């Protein structure tokens, strides 16, 4: 069976990032005007501020792509320079897929009994549900926060039914035709 599903996630811009970008642009213009009117010594800070602005604008733009193929979950970071493969996870290494506040995820939370490496690849949008995926990895398990669609959850459930533990009102609203065993 050759199933393939691609989910594209672009991260929502935080208000602090917008404020920082506006501050850098205002400082650049201020240094430019000071360099023209007062002294050319202000041109170097102007140039450095503009460089910082463009670097930060590029660095703060984050888009991710989840690809589910056959028995593998691939997570890529997409940027202007191409894509960077972050993880390639076989489905048999997935221990748990659940809501972030589910009782099954409590041992993997901060201060829980199991120490994990946490990676957040969500969009930060309130209207998009995200899920916790725990992956068996060495030396510590990996905790991924992902914006998965109902189709992606069904695909993982078909391959690894014992790992998907979804309960609560959110799951029924998303996918009423799939029940939890």
Image (cartoon, grey):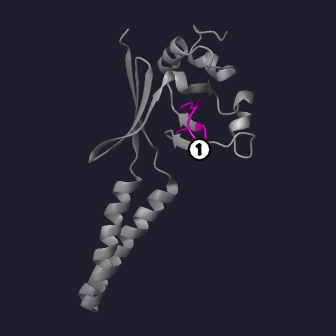
Q: 141 and 28: which one is in front? A: 141
Q: Residue 69: percent from the left, percent from the top? A: 39, 20
Q: Residue 55: percent from the left, percent from the top? A: 34, 62
Residue at 44% x, 19% y is 71
Residue at 34% x, 78% y is 30
Magenta-colored span:
125-142
Q: Residue 49: percent from the left, percent from the top? A: 34, 73
Please give left or right for residue 41 compared with residue 157 in the image.
left
Q: Which residue is farthest front? A: 139
Q: 174 and 118: which one is in front? A: 118
**Which residue position is annotated with label 1?**
117
Q: 59 and 164: which one is in front? A: 164
What main secondary structure does the magenta stretch of the protein show? loop
Q: Is residue 25 above or below residue 149?
A: below
Q: Is residue 35 above or below residue 153?
A: below
Residue at 35% x, 12% y is 2
Residue at 55% x, 33% y is 127
Q: Which residue is farthest bottom? A: 39
- Label 1 crowding class (10 Å Cα cut-off): few <14, some 14-19, many 20+? some
Q: Which of the 4 image quadrants contains residue 5?
A: top left
Q: Is residue 133 magenta?
A: yes
Q: Residue 134: percent from the left, percent from the top? A: 60, 32
Q: Is residue 96 above or below residue 21?
A: above
Q: Which of the 4 image quadrants contains residue 57?
A: bottom left
Locate the N terminus and report the quarter of the image it occupies. top left
The secondary structure type at the circle numbered 1 is strand
Please give left or right for residue 1 compared with residue 177 in the image.
left
Locate the C terminus and report the quarter of the image it occupies. top right
């Amino acid at each position: 069976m050759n199933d393939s599903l691609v989910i594209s996630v672009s991260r929502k811009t935080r208000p602090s990032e917008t404020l920082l970008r506006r501050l850098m642009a205002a400082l650049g213009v201020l240094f430019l005007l000071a360099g023209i009117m007062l002294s050319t010594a202000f041109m170097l800070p102007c140039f450095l501020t503009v460089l910082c602005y463009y670097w930060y604008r590029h660095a703060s733009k984050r888009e991710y792509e989840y690809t589910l193929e056959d028995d593998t979950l691939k997570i890529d970071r997409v940027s202007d320079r191409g894509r960077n493969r972050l993880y390639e996870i076989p489905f048999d290494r997935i221990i748990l897929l659940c809501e972030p506040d589910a009782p099954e995820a409590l041992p993997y939370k901060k201060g829980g009994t199991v120490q994990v490496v946490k990676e957040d690849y969500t969009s930060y949008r309130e209207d998009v549900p995200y899920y916790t995926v725990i992956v068996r990895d060495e030396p510590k398990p990996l905790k991924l926060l992902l914006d998965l669609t109902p189709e992606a959850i069904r695909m993982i459930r078909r391959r690894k039914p014992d790992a998907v533990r979804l309960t609560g009102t959110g799951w029924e609203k998303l996918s009423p035709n799939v029940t939890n065993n």
